Image (cartoon, helix red, strand yellow):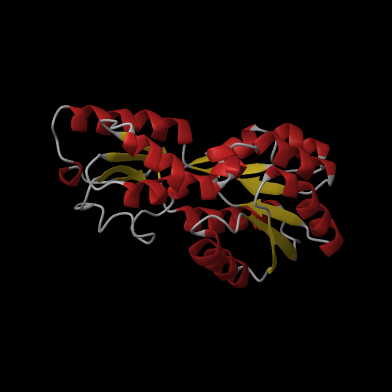
Amino acid sequence: MADGDYERLPQLAAELVRLNVDLIVTGGTPGTLAAKPATSKSPIVMAIAGDAVSTGLIASLPRPGGNIAGSTYFDPELTAKRLELMTEALPNIIRVAGLINPDHPQAMGTTRQALRRAAESLKLELVLFEARNPGEFESAFDAMAKAKVGAVAIADDPMFLGNLPALAGLAAQWRLPSTGSKEFAEAGGLIGYGVNFAEMFRRAAYFVDKILKGVKPNDLPVQQATKFELVVNGRTARALGLTIP
């Protein structure tokens, strides 16, 4: 994750290529996008990628092309779905915040568009806030409080996923209902909905095994996540004085 500094990723990918590794495993869209231009020979297995087709990582799911194999999921659509779940829990909500990392390749494009479309269809006022590193979390939540939002949706981002307890803690501090990945709810957020990241990393072993046994990455269809889990943190709901339907 390069300690959340995505500008370091190309350098780290180039270092792996110089080490002449047999295979590179990446976690997250930023890491995979950094690894792709670094090598056209070493196989790349993406354990997780937000939307591998729209970001240009692969040509298609059945025929990815090039040297990339692995799994993907529809990150922007999941972020939008979380807004819908929040309105079911808080039917009187009017204004919501979206927290994104502007350094993430999808954040300012597909993720922001999906959030805006979802907010419009749900008749919500959406206010976007940015955080590039954990040092910017507190100021982002302070700004949310000043904007008087009624809830916050945390976008999927490797840097965010590495700091979920801190994000959940700030949401609790400001008594702000929150939604994000299922791991976010397990870390203290109110509602989590998404894929099981640990399971996707375990699935990456399937692709590693196939490739190291001689199968070409282009001959392995990229798998799309089909299982989604909903987590509601009862302790957080009680602390906020909420009754979840």
Residue 87 image-quadrant placement: bottom right
Residue occupying the far front of the picture: 18
44 or 42, nearer to the observer: 42
Residue 16 image-quadrant placement: top left
- Image label count: 0
Residue 232 visible, this angle: no
Query: What residue is shown at x 33% (from left), y 47% (from top)?
Result: 38
Residue 113 visible, this angle: yes
Looking at the image, residue 146 sits to the left or right of residue 112; the answer is right
217 or 43, nearer to the observer: 43
In percent of width and height, residue 106 lies at 49, 59
Residue 17 image-quadrant placement: top left
In percent of width and height, residue 78 lies at 50, 53
In percent of width and height, residue 20 lies at 28, 32
Residue occupying the far right of the picture: 146
199 or 13, nearer to the observer: 13
Looking at the image, residue 205 sits to the left or right of residue 187; the answer is left
In percent of width and height, residue 165 lies at 69, 34
101 or 234, nearer to the observer: 101
Query: What residue is shown at x 66% (from left), y 47% (from top)?
Result: 133
Query: What residue is shown at x 33% (from left), y 52% (from top)?
Result: 37
Looking at the image, residue 66 sits to the left or right of residue 202; the answer is left
